[in-house]
Image (cartoon, helix red, strand yellow):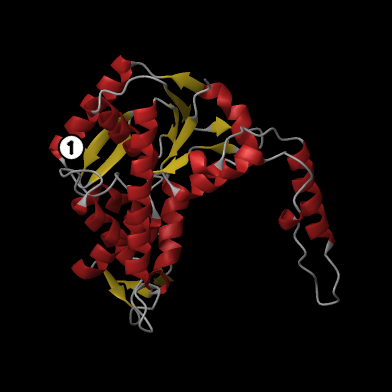
Amino acid sequence: MTLLKKEIVFGPSVQGSLRMAQFTGVGPFPKAFICTVKDKNGNIPDAIKRLNEKNEKKWYNSRPIGGNAKDIICLEMALEYGDISGRIPGKQREQVIYQLTSSLYQTSKGEDTTDEWAKSIIRNNKIYMKALREAMKNGDEIRIWYSSSPSELNGFYWLMNFFDKNKYYQNVSTVFLPPDYWNGEYYCNAWGQMPPEKYFDALCLEKPITEKQIKDCSDKWNKLRSENLPLRLLVSGNLVSLHEEFIDGFIRDCIEKMPDKFRIAHLVGNVMGECGLMLSDAILFHRVRSMIVSGELMLAEEWQEQPMSTLVKRK
């Protein structure tokens, strides 16, 4: 009997890329992938034609990794941030997810975008955890896609702890993406940066993980859990617990390069692009907002409906 293979990822963008990687290169180039943007004369610009040709060529030169969408389990826990002392997933983790989403969206026109988004993440985590437990019960093969990005690395260590608690040590493999991985076109550091047509080539990175490795990673997560600081990042090759203020120095360095007034989104984008922390915009925004509360930065206008768009100024 052939075992099913379940794919574990730690974010929706990777889930989408992996889903495409499952069938990229199968059959004719999908019409849905053809860009039909036209200029004012109703013609498709040459640049768009070249882009379509390039994407079509990529399609026919790609090999799929196989599998089905239902085999992908996406655990979007945001474990790099917030309290991890409680059960995961659980109410405590749900509160952290809500905190991060609420920092990006505000209620408007009678619709609570934050509430719906957070509920969607929490609901999906419950569904995928049920699928994971079922896969473990059936002894399915489990393949974990992770990298040094904080969300993926923390998710991986937590998952090893989950396996260890449930004495599940068989049929588990990992595909770890090393830092500055050359995919043939550019360097990438996380699976969310990897185009679908490159996943097949990266399968050479797949390795089985042993019981001892699972236990060692589980012990590491227990240590992080006991420390329970607000932030967990890779520093000098080790995943370590940190205070939130660790991020502030990077933010301040970028503020120094900004004009007197600037949009928060511009600052957050610069931090993400220049500092290599691989943290989400929600976490960085949370720290910028704390600087506004403390008076280190000042609002140059009222909070916008989308808070990231708010204009701020130096003190």
Residue beneath the point at 69% across and 32% down:
63
* Residue found at the far left of this picture: 226
Residue beneath the point at 33% across and 36% down:
133
Left or right: 12 in relation to 296: right
Against 124, residue 192 (above or below) is above
Q: Position of residue 127 (x, y in %)?
A: 37, 48
Q: Position of residue 102 (x, y in %)?
A: 30, 66
Q: Which amino acid type corresponds to the residue marked 1 in the rendered image?
A: Arg
Question: Mark 1 sits on what residue?
Answer: 225
Residue 152 seen in the figure: yes
Against 232, residue 216 (above or below) is above
Left or right: 248 in relation to 193: left
Q: Position of residue 95 (x, y in %)?
A: 22, 57
Left or right: 37 in relation to 309: right
Q: Secondary structure at mark 1?
A: helix
Q: Quadrant of residue 220?
A: top left
Q: Mark 1: few, some, or many residues within 10 Å (few <14, many ≥20)?
A: some
Against 39, residue 193 (above or below) is above
